[in-house]
Image: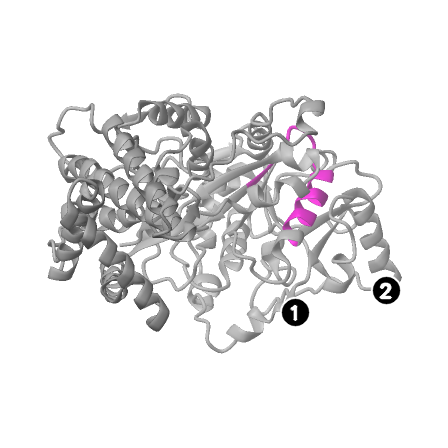
């Protein structure tokens, strides 16, 4: 019977947006039937954030959840179509996108806002019953503002009671005053102030008009333009439903956003687009982004899908709080970082996959087949017809690939040879400790340095070989996500990837300084020195002198190595310049996961 059109953005606009929206959806659902629908267009919410309804789904009633359908318009689409608009939301495009995707079996379309409430007269159980008795026409209604202190004092989860309380508040305070604006000298198509909160007409009318005028991409008057064209289409007649229905608006002027913009905002042309408007149609045949496949989903089904990830737990076992695996107290931080559990890491990558359109292209670059299997499984739970492409197994493409998400795996498994070297070096250190030549803290520190340096050397060689062979197949583009698995933003291979990506995908030359090259050579030398120190008296002496040097530097300067301190400062400055050039924005850092987005 009825499709309700709303739009918004997950940006906390105005006063307490999340409560206002949940409060509005819950109350709106009370006026609808199961055959109706609420369409919410989430416009230009940043990709890494959920849509506004997804953000508040747990505060919605079961009825509101079942009626809500969400359409997402991404920041990339906004950048393509905004032209000279200063707005973050193109209201007319958003509303049109919902209109053209509304249920064609519904006879009526209501264009309103998510913070608007419908209060029906006692004779009407729902909007469907009211509209069955009304002729086809264009309907406007006045709105009654409810102050923040009133609506914010009510719980959002009790919509039926809230509607009764607010209705009685208006009656008691004699605040149900319709602000009329018709002037027979100039116009008769606007009956009430703020017409955009309730514009109701048969769905056919909106299609004959081609919706809201998308050329009006500045502030205000879009609703007045629609009202004028509806009035022309309807034989110069605008109707209302006074006596049957009240429209309440959750006021939010305390935020000051509107007042702050007065005098600076640029309005649409009221004179040309409203007073002088004589054309009924607007837009071209592609109005409402009909040529694009926009993500659209039922919020109730999305919430139900999320609940499937909670498997039944044995209460008696769970009550003991068992860890999933034993704590690793080993002094091998880099190895712990890169030697991860694929099934666990895939759970956190899934958070990014959930906000992607189902047709997104996902590519994997790495060597761990189990990680690829787990990532594919998680992606197919979200988009059953899709898969994760393995760059190393695909034939060399004729053109470069432009994935929406590039999953870069940094998983590392030591070879048996390197495991043996670690054990040998640990035994050497234990011998030095037994003779009293080093302290326990120095032994632990030296073991950590050795394992990290040797692991980093092996990992870097392995990863660079993969990256240099396969990253050249990728065409970088703004909006592309890059996920480093088995990595964090402190690891050396985090920066090594950015250097390689800049060189191979962003066409930025290799500008590593002599200090960077020298540092790489020195790290290799230290690993060799530590491994071979036992059989060679000179290398053994050099290792001992290095230990004494670190003690002295720590005592007098607070740093273990002057050269290390200088290199770190140089490294951070180079990294800052590179990140500024690449414009890679880090969105999320987990223990073993870095999610970035290429901004430009």
Residue at 40% x, 35% y: name it: 357
Left or right of 84 on screen, residue 460: left
Instruction: Give the label, 1 or 2, closer to the camera.
Output: 1
Q: Nearer the viewer, residue 466 or 95?
A: 466
Residue 254: image tag: 1
| Quadrant of the rendered image containing residue 201 | top right
Q: Residues within 10 Å of mark 2 (few under 14, many from 20)?
A: few
Q: Earlier in the sequence, mark 1 or mark 2?
A: 2
Q: Nearer the viewer, residue 534 or 235?
A: 534
Q: Nearer the viewer, residue 229 or 563?
A: 563
| Quadrant of the rendered image containing residue 315 | top right
Q: Nearer the viewer, residue 190 or 530?
A: 530
Q: Position of residue 27 (x, y in %)?
A: 72, 44
Q: Quadrant of the N terminus?
A: top right
In the rendered image, residue 23 lying in the magenta stretch gets the answer: yes
| Quadrant of the rendered image containing residue 361 | top left
Residue at 33% x, 39% y: name it: 426
Q: Position of residue 231 (x, y in %)?
A: 55, 52
Q: Is residue 188 visible?
A: yes
In the rendered image, residue 27 lying in the magenta stretch gets the answer: yes
Q: Position of residue 4 (x, y in %)?
A: 60, 41
Residue at 36% x, 34% y: name it: 339
Residue numbers of the magenta segment: 20-39
For the image shown, how many numbered marks are present on the structure? 2
Q: Position of residue 442 (x, y in %)?
A: 37, 53
Residue at numbered disc 2? 173
Left or right of 539 on screen, residue 550: right
Left or right of 69 on screen, residue 428: left
């Amino acid at each position: 019977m009825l499709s309700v059109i709303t739009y918004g953005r997950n940006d906390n606009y105005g006063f307490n947006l999340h409560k206002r929206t949940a409060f509005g959806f819950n109350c709106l659902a009370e006026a609808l039937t199961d055959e109706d629908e609420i369409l919410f267009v989430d416009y230009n919410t940043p990709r890494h954030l959920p849509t506004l309804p997804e953000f508040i789904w747990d505060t919605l009633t079961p009825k509101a959840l079942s009626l809500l359908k969400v359409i997402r318009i991404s920041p990339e689409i906004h950048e393509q179509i905004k032209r000279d608009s200063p707005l973050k939301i193109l209201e007319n495009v958003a509303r049109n996108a919902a209109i053209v995707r509304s249920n064609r079996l519904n006879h009526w379309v209501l264009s309103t806002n998510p913070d608007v409430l419908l209060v029906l007269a006692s004779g009407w159980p729902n909007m469907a019953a009211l509209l069955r008795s009304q002729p086809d026409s264009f309907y406007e209604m006045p709105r009654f503002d409810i102050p923040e202190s009133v609506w914010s004092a009510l719980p959002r989860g009790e919509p039926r009671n809230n509607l009764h309380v607010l209705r009685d508040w208006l009656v008691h305070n004699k605040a149900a005053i319709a602000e009329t604006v018709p002037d027979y000298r100039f116009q008769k198509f606007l009956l009430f102030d703020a017409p955009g909160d309730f514009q109701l007409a048969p769905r056919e009318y909106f299609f004959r008009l081609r919706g809201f005028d998308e050329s009006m991409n500045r502030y205000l008057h879009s609703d007045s333009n629609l009202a004028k064209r509806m009035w022309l289409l309807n034989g110069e007649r605008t109707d209302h439903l006074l006596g049957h229905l009240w429209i309440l608006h959750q006021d939010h002027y305390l935020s000051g956003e509107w007042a702050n913009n007065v005098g600076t905002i640029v309005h649409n042309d009221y004179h040309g687009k409203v007073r002088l408007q004589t054309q009924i149609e607007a837009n071209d045949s592609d109005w409402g982004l009909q040529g694009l496949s926009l993500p659209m989903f039922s919020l109730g089904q999305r919430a139900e899908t999320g609940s499937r990830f909670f498997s039944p737990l044995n209460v008696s076992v769970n009550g003991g709080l068992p860890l999933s695996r034993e704590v690793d107290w080993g002094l091998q931080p880099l190895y712990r970082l890169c030697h991860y559990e694929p099934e666990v890491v895939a759970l956190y990558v899934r958070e990014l996959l959930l906000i992607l359109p189902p047709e997104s292209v996902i590519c994997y670059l790495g060597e761990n087949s189990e990680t690829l299997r787990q990532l594919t499984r998680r992606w197919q739970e979200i988009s059953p017809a899709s898969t994760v492409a393995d760059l190393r197994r695909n034939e060399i493409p004729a053109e470069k690939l432009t994935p929406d998400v590039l999953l870069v795996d940094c998983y590392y498994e030591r070879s048996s040879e390197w495991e043996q070297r670690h054990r040998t070096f640990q035994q050497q250190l234990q011998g030095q400790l037994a003779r009293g030549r080093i302290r326990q803290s120095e032994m632990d520190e030296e073991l950590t340095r050795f394992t990290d340096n040797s692991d980093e050397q092996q990992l870097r060689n392995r990863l660079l070989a993969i990256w240099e062979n396969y990253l050249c197949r990728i065409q970088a583009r703004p909006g592309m996500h890059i996920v480093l698995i088995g990595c964090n933003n402190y690891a050396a291979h985090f920066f090594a990837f950015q250097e390689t990506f800049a060189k191979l995908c962003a066409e930025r030359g290799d500008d590593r300084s002599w200090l960077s090259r020298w540092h790489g050579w020195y790290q290799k030398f230290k690993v060799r020195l530590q491994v071979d120190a036992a059989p060679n008296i000179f290398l053994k002496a050099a290792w001992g002198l290095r230990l004494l040097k670190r003690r002295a530097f720590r005592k007098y300067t607070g740093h273990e190595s002057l050269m290390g301190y200088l290199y770190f400062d140089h490294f951070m400055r180079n990294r800052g310049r590179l990140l500024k050039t690449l414009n890679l924005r880090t969105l999320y850092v987990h223990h073993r996961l870095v999610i970035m987005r290429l901004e430009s």
